[in-house]
Image (spheres, rainbow, N blue to C red):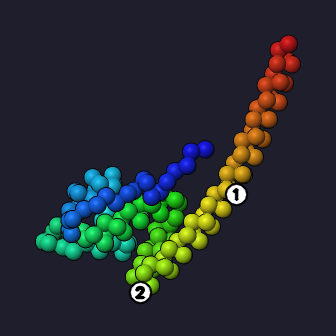
């Protein structure tokens, strides 16, 4: 099974820009404007407004990358929001890293159990299909 890196999937390239338009971020991350507006409605990002235009900060951009990584890993938006909120603690992100690492390990364990169950189901289905085909062959032969 190929290994999928969430970090590589949404890398943040270096930039000197301090502000980003919705169009810039939708192109960078391959998401729709509606997705960014939804993340805003959910309180995960907080772009400022210039009239009707949304202006996203470097912080918003980093949070979008985290959101997409978290979604790719199968976390709920509530879980992602909780992990993002830990960024604001005044501990150089130590708590955020520790909590996120543990949640990733827990998620990996749950997925491994799920995979084991799926592999067992696939094996059962294959054996059942084989037995049905043998019955069919016996009747035809």
Q: Quadrant of residue 10?
A: bottom left
Query: In this picture, is 139 found above or below 103?
Result: above
Decide if residue 138 is on the left or right side of residue 83.
Answer: right
Front-most of residues 132 and 40: 40
Decide if residue 65 is on the left or right side of residue 82.
Answer: left
Report whether residue 54 is seen: no
Q: Quadrant of the C terminus?
A: top right
Percent x, y for residue 64? 36, 65
Disc 1 versus disc 2: nearer the observer = 2
Decide if residue 17 is on the left or right side of residue 117.
Answer: left
User: Label 2 crowding class (10 Å Cα cut-off): few <14, some 14-19, many 20+?
Assistant: few
Percent x, y for residue 13? 31, 58
Q: Which residue is mark 2?
A: 90
User: Label 1 crowding class (10 Å Cα cut-off): few <14, some 14-19, many 20+?
Assistant: few
Residue pictured at 76% horizontal, 40% vertical: 123
Front-most of residues 4 and 40: 4
Q: Which residue is mark 1?
A: 113
Front-most of residues 59 and 118: 59
Query: In this picture, is 80 found above or below 115?
Result: below
SS class of the residue under badge 2?
Answer: loop
Residue pictured at 24% horizontal, 68% vertical: 56
The residue sitting at the top extreme is 141
Q: Quadrant of the N terminus?
A: top right
Residue pictured at 54% horizontal, 75% vertical: 98
First in residue order: circle 1 vs circle 2: 2
Percent x, y for residue 51? 13, 71
Q: Quadrant of residue 110?
A: bottom right
Decide if residue 65 is on the left or right side of residue 79.
Answer: left
Distance between mark 1 and mark 2 Cα atoms:
36 Å
SS class of the residue under badge 1?
Answer: helix
């Amino acid at each position: 099974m190929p290994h999928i890196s969430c970090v590589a999937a949404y890398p943040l390239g270096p930039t000197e820009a301090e502000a980003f338009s919705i169009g810039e971020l939708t192109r960078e991350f391959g998401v729709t404007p509606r997705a960014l507006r939804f993340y805003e409605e959910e309180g995960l990002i907080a772009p400022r407004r210039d009239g009707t235009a949304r202006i996203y900060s470097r912080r918003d951009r980093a949070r979008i990358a985290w959101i997409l990584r978290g979604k790719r890993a199968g976390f709920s938006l509530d879980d992602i929001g909780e992990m993002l909120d830990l960024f604001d603690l005044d501990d150089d992100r130590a708590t955020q890293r520790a909590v996120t690492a543990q949640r990733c390990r827990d998620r990996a364990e749950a997925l491994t159990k799920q995979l084991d169950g799926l592999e067992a189901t696939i094996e059962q289905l294959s054996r059942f299909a084989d037995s049905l085909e043998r019955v069919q062959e016996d009747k035809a032969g």
